[in-house]
Image: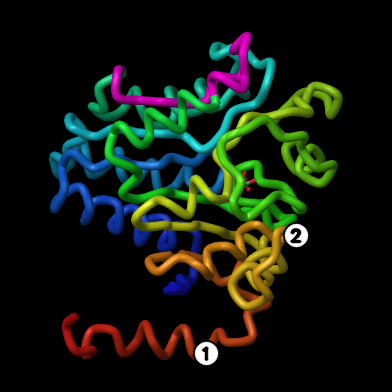
Amino acid sequence: MEVIIKQTYEEMSRAAAHDVARLLNTKPNAVLGMATGSTPLGMYQELVRMHREEGLDFSQVTTFNLDEYVSLPVSHPQSYHYFMQENFFKHVNVPKQNTYIPSGTTSNYQAFCAWFERRIEECGGIDLQILGIGSDGHVAFNEPGSSLSSRTRLKTLAKQTIEDNARFFERREDVPIYAITMGVGTILEARRLLLVANGKNKAWACAAAIEGPITGMVTASALQMHARAKVFLDDAAASELKMREYYDWIEERRPGAPQV
Ligand code: PGA
C-alpha cells in the first residue's frame, strides 16, 4: 500500500485528483469508481478545475458509484444521486448514460444488485476505485462484520455511521437505516484503489486500516490485500500511524527511485 501524507486537506485533494487525471490521460475511456461524502469533495473540485482550465476530458469515461441510501428518491438533497449531480457530473462531460449509481428505490434489490455487478463486468471492470473511510473503518457502506468477499447488496448501517451522517440531515431520525453498497469483494476487483481521508476523527480508522490486522471488523483493512492501493491522508488523519516517518521517507525518496 502506498501511503501519501500531505499537510492539508487541499494538498491531499489535489494530489489525489492528479492521480485520477494521470489515469485519464493514459486511458481516456477509463472506468472510474466514485465515492460520495465530504472527503472527496476537494478532489472533485480539483478535477472540475482541471476539466475547465486544462481540458481534462471525461467524454469517454464510465463511472460506477459505491453506494446509495435506501428509500431516498434521486431528487433528495442527501441522496448520492443528487450529490454526484451537484458536485461532479453537472460540471464535467461524463455522458449521462455512462454513469451508474446503485438505486435506493428499486422494487427488487436482489435483482438490481446482480445487474449492477454484471454492468461493472460488461464495462470491463473498474480501473480506479475512489474510496473514503468511515470513522468505524468501513469502506463504502461495508460496516464492521461485513464479509471481505461480499458483493453489492443491501446493508443495515451501523449506529456510528448513522451518527456520523446525521450532520447532513435535519434530524437524526431522517438518516436512512439501510443502504445498497458495493461489497468488499467487488471493490477489491478494481485494478487500482485510491482512498482519501482527512481529519482527526479518521485517525483511528486509518491506523487500523493501514497498520492493523486484516479484519472484517475494519473493512478498509482489506486494502492491504490489494496490489495497487494508494491512500492519501492529511496530517490529522495520519496522526495515529506508527510508521509515519517511514511513509514520509519513502515519499521523499520517490523522485530518485529507479523507474519500474
Ligand atoms: P465522509 O464519509 O467523507 O463524509 O467522512 C466517508 C465514509 O463514510 O466513507
> Please, what is the three-letter code of the amino acid marked with disc 2?
Met
- Specify the label residue 245 is tagged with: 1
Q: Secondary structure at mark 2?
A: loop
Q: Residues within 10 Å of mark 1 (few under 14, many from 20)?
A: few
Q: Which residue is mark 2?
A: 217
Q: Residue 14 — which label? A: none
Identity of the residue drawn at 47% across and 84% down: 247
Q: Position of residue 164 (x, y in %)?
A: 75, 43
Of residues 125 and 202, the one drawn nearer to the viewer in this rendering? 125
Q: Decide which of 233, 42 is in the foreground and name it.
A: 233
Residue interval drawn in magenta: 97-112
Tell me the mark number nearer the camera, choosing from 2 and 1. Answer: 2
Q: How is the image coloured?
A: rainbow
Considering only vertical position in the picture, is 82 above or below 251?
above
Quarter of image, res 169: top right
Front residue of 110 and 88: 110
Residue in the picture at 29% in, 84% down: 254
Q: Would you say 123 lies left or right of 208 here?
A: left
Q: Position of residue 246 (x, y in %)?
A: 49, 90
